[in-house]
Amino acid sequence: MCMAIEKKCSCNQESARFHHQNSILPFETIANLYCPACSKNVEFNAATMIADNGWIIEYDMTVAEIYGEKMGLTGDQLTPERIFDEGYCTWQGFTPNDLKQANEEKEQLAELAKTDMKRYIQSMKEWSVNRHRKLHKEGWRKAGETVGV
């Protein structure tokens, strides 16, 4: 079972959806969220933060340490990079608002399904690969994981 949450950034202009793999880490693991606008005023601390394309997630590492053993990560193994990259507290999708963006893009293709299912399926495959490549090129951390699609 996985938990998904939404959190506003510190300037309240943006929000991001988070995925918590296996629901191990609680909501409180995210101490702060900074969008590209408010992250400009933040001094980056690699011991508690991860940066992704202008966004910064600040983790409460004390909270993370409490649950670290359940993730199989203790001591020096428990880093913001591991928490994010291994899915314990990461974007729900490739970007902070990936699901919303992807659904909007897919809606444009949905009409095709009513008239030509074979073309619709092919278009969805192409859309998926092209979108992944685009996000990888834009520098999104999670899109770089499996770009060899």
Image (cartoon, grey):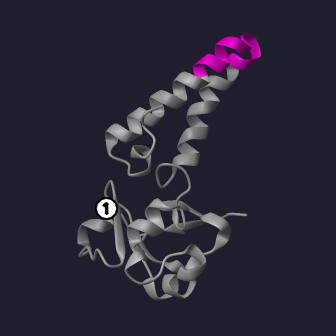
Percent of width and height locating residue 113: 72, 19
Going by the numbered disc 1, the residue's amino acid type is Ala
**Neighbourhood count class around disc 1 (C-alpha, 10 Å): few under 14, some 14–19, many 20 upward:** some
Please report the bounds of the magenta region as a residue range: 112-123
The stretch drawn in magenta includes residue 117: yes
Residue 35 shows in the view: yes
Label 1: which residue?
A: 37
In the depicted view, which residue is nearer to us: 39 or 46? 46
* Residue under the point 66% across and 18% down: 120
Q: Position of residue 140 (x, y in %)?
A: 38, 48
Quarter of the image that includes the N terminus? bottom right
Q: Is residue 80 left or right of residue 108?
A: left
The secondary element bearing badge 1 is classed as loop
* Horizontal and vertical percent position of residue 80: 40, 71
Q: Nearer the viewer, residue 12 or 30?
A: 30
**Is 32 on the left or on the right of 93, as rendered?**
left
> Which quadrant of the structure image shows residue 67?
bottom right
Residue 102 image offset from top left, x and y in percent: 56, 39
Main secondary structure type of the part rendered in magenta: helix
